[in-house]
Amino acid sequence: MKREFQQTTWDEGLGREWNNLLALAVAEDLGVAGDLTSLALVPAAAMGRAAVVARRPGVLAGEAGAAMTLTAFDRGLRWTSAAKDGQAIVRGQVIGRIEGPARAMLAAERPLLNFLGRLSGIASHARRYVDAVAGTPTRIYDTRKTTPGWRKLEKYAVRCGGGCNHRAGLFEAVLIKDNHLALGAELSPRGLGGYSPAEAVVRAREFLESHLGPAGREVIVEIEVDTLAQFDEVIAVGPDLVLLDNMAPAELREAVARRDARSPSIELEASGGIDLGTVRATAEAGVDRISVGALTHSAVSLDFGLDWGA
């Protein structure tokens, strides 16, 4: 049976994550003294209105938190949405309008645009990869290569771009990587015992059942391999997923053929050095998943501006 990681959606918990980061953004901008420029130049009773406008085309992410951002600065600020998360947007498009106390609006401008820019940049980058493999059954996944503290929101942005979420953290799944096997071999001379890739999968299953009981059977077990010999060994013991690390398309096709012949229920994930120039060929090799750290660690923020009076 195909297994899936938890996929991130906008909910109350994600709203709390947004507010946690927002509290830091407010503190770093306003400090103790507040917005000195607006205090000096803008009357306390002044009201204003403005539009948030996309300066570049892309995919929107973060609009769901815009109203919360504004009310953190002043409950009198009102947000009227003109676009929703996951929507493709064009240059010059208004995604929402703000009305309310002018001082608060000016203070909220940069944090709001920073959130929208960062998350929409990730969503836009994810959409490029998703579009690049269109027409194949391959799904694009993110990784844990995220900004500390921003992981849930960045994974939400990947979903807005049409991508899928890999494990949210070390707590969600077992992913046996080369360093786990290397450490096992290093410890072996001291009597603690190393293990082969297949043995590692078996040990992981035994651990999950002994520590979590029946719930342990629901935890995904994935293992990374970098040779076809390792691949042959591990599919015999039935992990849920096999991560094919840094394999060329010809090797990937061979792994897919061997999987199809011997263990068709196991899903195959390709990873390592895959970019927009190579992702299509990787997908056409027949893998089920491609994980790309660049979705989050290399995304460029999408540019938004606040047009006063619009």
Image: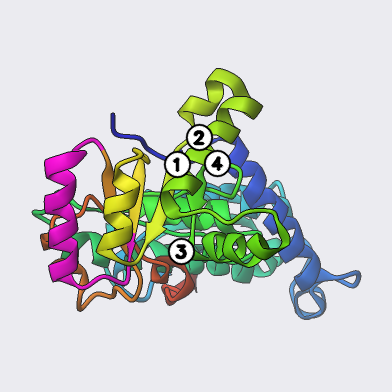
Real-space CA distance between mark 1 and mark 2, rounded to the nearest whole angstrom: 8 Å
Q: What range of the chain is rendered magenta?
A: 244-265
| Residue situated in front as seen by the camera: 186 or 36 | 186
For marks 3 and 2 on the same chain, the one whose residue lies earlier in the sequence: 3
| Residue situated in front as seen by the camera: 59 or 245 | 245
Few, some or many C-alpha atoms within 10 Å of disc 3 (few <14, some 14-19, many ≥20)? Answer: many
Q: Position of residue 152 (x, y in %)?
A: 55, 51
Marks 2/4 in contact by CB < 8 Å: the verdict is no
Decide whether residue 165 is among the magenta residues. Answer: no
State whether residue 89 appears in this view. Answer: no
Residue type at mark 1 is Val
> Which corner quadrant holds the C terminus?
bottom left
> Which corner quadrant holds the N terminus?
top left
For marks 3 and 4 on the same chain, the one whose residue lies earlier in the sequence: 3
Query: Could you tell me which residue is drawn at 11 percent across and 42 percent down?
Result: 261
Identify the residue at the far right of this view: 32
For marks 1 and 3 on the same chain, the one whose residue lies earlier in the sequence: 3
Real-space CA distance between mark 3 and mark 2, rounded to the nearest whole angstrom: 54 Å
Marks 1/2 in contact by CB < 8 Å: the verdict is yes
Residue behind mark 3: 51
User: Which callout, 1 or 4, points to the residue nearer the camera?
Assistant: 1
Residue behind mark 4: 172
Residue behind mark 1: 221
Residue behind mark 2: 205
Q: Position of residue 245 (x, y in %)?
A: 34, 66
